[in-house]
Amino acid sequence: MKNLIIFILCLSITNVHGQLNKSIWKSSLCQFGAGFADGANQAYLFHYSKSGLFEKWNIKPNSVAWENKWAKDENGNPIVGQERFWQSSRALVFLTDFHHSTRFATNRLNEGTLLVYAIGHGRKRKKWYWYLADLGIMFTAKSAGFYTSYELIF
């Protein structure tokens, strides 16, 4: 909650001067999502049994979820090296388990942030400390997302 208050204060104070990137809200929303996905991932990896939500949502623990990317023999045992579906152990591994899905979401949202920020920048030149303000706002948004998922939800 403290991070969210700081985030809102930073936006309200710095928007007065109009030096922030015009897409700071979109970039911050991407960073909030990236932080949320990362927090969910860390809760899954380190607090699976404490949460109870993962079992409720029928998400397998990471110790057995890795098996989802491999084909199974007639006894239900994974056949390591034989993919369950095309690219299930490589490019499409994010479709197989919660850990890889949240890592995928975090990385794509970080990349999306960069893209949105770059498009919003345009050709406008500004002092170096305004870039730090932009980064501070986005970092706070990512921290707020992480806190929301890791501490409040899971």
Image (cartoon, rainbow, N blue to C red):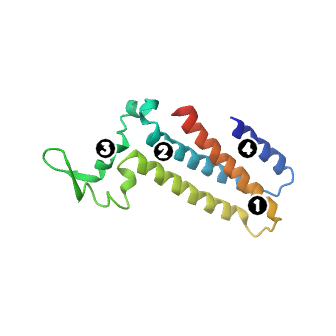
Q: Nearer the viewer, mark 3 or mark 1?
A: 3
Sequence-first disc among 4 and 3 = 4
Residue labelled with disc 4: 7
Q: CA distance from mark 3 to mark 2?
A: 15 Å
Q: Nearer the viewer, mark 4 or mark 2?
A: 2
Decide: few, some or many residues near mark 3? Use Cα within 10 Å; few <14, some 14-19, many ≥20.
few
Residue labelled with disc 2: 41
**Callouts 3 and 1 close, C-beta under 8 Å:** no
Closest to the observer, 85 or 2: 2
Residue 69 shown left or right of residue 8 in the figure: left
Which quadrant does the N terminus fall into? top right
Q: CA distance from mark 2 to mark 1?
A: 29 Å
Residue labelled with disc 1: 131
Q: CA distance from mark 3 to mark 1?
A: 44 Å
Q: Nearer the viewer, mark 4 or mark 3?
A: 3
Helix, strand or loop at mark 2: helix
Q: CA distance from mark 4 to mark 1?
A: 15 Å
Which residue is painted at 74% across and 38% down in the image?
A: 5
Residue labelled with disc 3: 64
Decide: few, some or many residues near mark 2? Use Cα within 10 Å; few <14, some 14-19, many ≥20.
many
Under mark 2, the amino acid is Asn
